[in-house]
Image: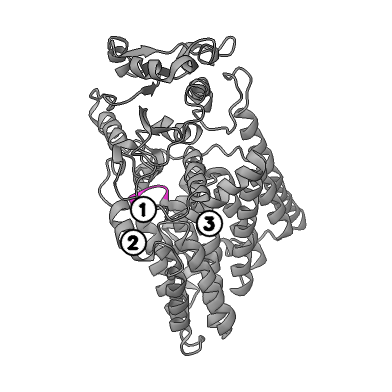
Amino acid sequence: MWLLLAAGVVTAWLSPLADADLPLHLRIGDLLRTSDGWPHLEPVSWTRAGAPWYAYSWLPEWLYAQAWALAGAAGLAGLHAVLTGASILAVWDVAHRDAWSVWGTRLFLGLHLVLWTIVQPATRPQLVLAIAVPMAWGAALRLRDGETLWGAGMALLAAMLAVNSHLLFPLGLAPGLLILAEAKRAPRGALVAFVAATLLGWCATPYLFELPAIFALNFATNALFGAGAAIQEHEPGFRWFTHAPLGMQALTFLMLVLPVLPSSFGQPAGRLRWLTVAWLAGLGLFVLAVRGLLLWWLLAMPLTAAALGSIPLPQRASTMRAVRAAWLFMLAALPLQAWQARMAMSTPGHPLPTPPLPHPEAAALEPVVAWLQCVTAGDVVATAAVGAHATTVFNYGSYLAWRVPSLSWSVDGRTIFPDSVSRAEAEQGRAGSRWHPPYGSAVAVVLPPWHVTGHLLDGDSAFVRVPLSRAGGTPERSTAHLWARRSWMEAVGPKSGRNACGNGA
């Protein structure tokens, strides 16, 4: 367990923090740190100004902003390492309470590390569910064993973590099926205590009375889901399975056949029946979108551990030593893989100045950011309704909303479900038709070099293309293009000139 914990913490510490949504989470965290109340209206996007918006993931976002304010990228890396370590400890607690075999625990935690540090290394609220859901399993096991006070307390804490971190917090009820699965062993009232503690924990959110509106807002029909989804993690699970890497296909196949494996049939019929219900809930999430695979993994923990533990151990001592050596090699390889990913994000030749966060689009956007920060220096936008309008595309929106908060961007603060600009992108990707983002009221437009709207802006007398400095040898096609409204440049005065803002750099 200590080796697994060390490997997981070090791997998380070295991970490059390159998740595309992280900058927008930081922006929301800054909003929470500086505001007096809980936001209920769109704070980022002028395309949704005045529309309902809720910071339902406020806890991790506030922690991200605090860590960044204290120690920058090192603070975020440290927080990511702590959360990853907490997930490992929570899973190990379940293994201990449910009497998993040592072999099954090693294999399960090894795969758990691979999934949450390599396959999905993101610093995002979903990682908190990797703590809260195993905690809920641990709470159910304690209640099953008659430890009412500790079990109810753990269920309460797990629910409080989940409801303030992720939209899918109701998954925390699934471990209660374990009490039904072992009803003969569990004392009377154990299930009632689990459900009551979980429901009480869900009440510990500032958005308690807005939860129906939050679900209605975020589970509405969206163009980025379903067949042909523009974002890979929103792709339906079985469609993704057809082109997934071989290792992920093997893991997904294992998850699919869990209920019919000999290890499952070796369990009492009642336990298998109720644990299969939790497995089916995870399968449903995976069918909807590939991002549900990690949640499926959490919901099927007992069945998966039993299947892995049933793999026969080698009988020969030399073979057993080789297996142990391979397991140790995997633990050592995880930090090295993370370090390699970090180094790949900081290759020479990126535009200057050095991006403060290794966002996938940071290299393309930093010259734009530097010019806009210079021009808007001292400007502060309190809400999306009062900031000067700026237009961009979905892939740029998260980073720009964080780095240039003085402008109100055409991106949606909900992060999962984008605004009209992104819907247009998704429809364009499916139909192959041309589209143009809404820039009629924008003072600045930031687009990729290949974007078809660039030709319209070049021919529009109301806009001027801003020359941007790039690092020596960096091709123009790798840097985002910026257009500014002429009247806005005249209004902001000398700050927008070449001398004041360094020719755009």
For disc 1, the marked residue is 40
| Residue appearing at x 34%, y 61% in the figure | 210
Bounds of the magenta segment: 286-291
Residue 113 screen position, x and y as percent: 60, 51
**Where 384 sits versus 2, above or below?**
above
Nearer-the-camera pick, 244 or 494: 494
- Left or right of 88? Residue 205 is left
Q: Is residue 287 magenta?
A: yes
For disc 3, the marked residue is 128
- Residue type beneath disc 2: Glu
CA separation in Å, label 3 and label 2: 21 Å
Earlier residue among tags 3 and 2: 3
Residue 420 screen position, x and y as percent: 27, 36
Q: Is residue 85 magenta?
A: no
Q: Quadrant of residue 147?
A: bottom right
- Residue type beneath disc 3: Val
Residue 136 screen position, x and y as percent: 51, 69
